[in-house]
Image (cartoon, rainbow, N blue to C red):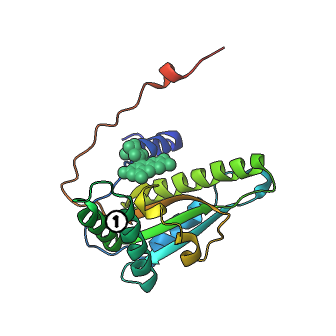
């Protein structure tokens, strides 16, 4: 068998990663979380601002429960259909409570809009690093900018600064069966590339 080249390996991992939001009850080891964050911080970042901050919320931890309540309250307030308020809020809360591991990613602002934007880009790269290395470990990740990121009180509760921009809440765990290979849908690269 031919040895897989480095390009083939990286390309395979990138293309096989999919968003995962349904997990088994299996625990995710703290060491795995630490290792994927370790890969996150090797993302490119202009001016070496290292603008990312991560908050890990342990399953069963007090902080997770406090944030879950914020998400519940936010969802009740923001679900337009009165008949859906409680059920939508309970769904969001329970998904948050049940996720085997959770990481919030924040990006620090810079001294001006340009650097703030660069920092946000860098932190997004960091999240992608994290997702790819998690995938390589057999873990699935769902990047959410939805309900879990919405409560106004979230930053303060986590210990983040109000001025930081939330980049996402990462739901992490082992994908629940049935694991059906999703056919990835992407426009072919040539259709979005102009060679000049
Ligand atoms: C910045 C960002 C925010 C996202 N927010 C959500 C979200 O709130 N809810 C969700 O279900 N997926 C979210 N996703 C995941 C995308 O929907 C997903 O990446 C897309 O459907 C492509 O699927 P794939 O990741 O399996 O390739 C987000 C992805 C990114 C990059």
104 and 49: which one is in front? 104
- Please give the residue where the numbered disc 1 appears in the rendered image: 76
* Residue found at the very far front of the displayed protein: 82
Image quarter in which the C terminus is found: top right
Percent from the top left, x then y, of residue 152?
53, 66
Percent from the top left, x then y, of residue 83?
21, 59
Image quarter in which the N terminus is found: top left
85 and 68: which one is in front? 85
Q: Identify the residue shown where x is 39% and y is 80%.
A: 65
With respect to residue 148, does 5 lie above or below? above
* Residue found at the very far bottom of the displayed protein: 62
- Residue 108, can we see it? yes
With respect to residue 177, does 60 lie above or below? below
Q: Identify the residue shown where x is 43% and y is 56%.
A: 146
137 left or right of 179 in image: right
Q: Identify the residue shown where x is 59% and y is 75%.
A: 156
């Amino acid at each position: 068998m031919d040895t897989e080249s480095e390009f083939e390996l990286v390309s395979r991992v990138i293309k096989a990663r999919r968003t995962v939001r349904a997990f088994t009850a299996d625990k995710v080891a703290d060491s795995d979380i630490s290792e994927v964050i370790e890969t996150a911080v090797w993302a490119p970042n202009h001016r070496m601002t290292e603008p990312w901050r991560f908050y890990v919320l342990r399953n069963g931890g007090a902080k997770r429960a406090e944030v879950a309540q914020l998400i519940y309250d936010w969802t009740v307030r923001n679900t337009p259909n009165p008949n859906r308020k409680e059920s939508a809020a309970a769904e969001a809360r329970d998904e948050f409570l049940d996720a085997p591991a959770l990481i919030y990613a924040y990006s620090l602002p810079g001294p001006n809009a340009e650097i703030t934007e660069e920092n946000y880009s860098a932190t997004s790269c960091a999240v992608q690093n994290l997702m790819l290395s998690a995938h390589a470990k057999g873990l699935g990740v769902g990047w959410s900018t939805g309900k879990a990121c919405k409560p106004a009180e979230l930053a303060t509760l986590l210990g983040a600064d109000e001025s930081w921009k939330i980049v996402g809440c990462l739901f992490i765990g082992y994908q629940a069966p049935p694991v059906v290979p999703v056919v990835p849908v992407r426009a072919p690269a040539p259709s979005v590339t102009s060679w000049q």
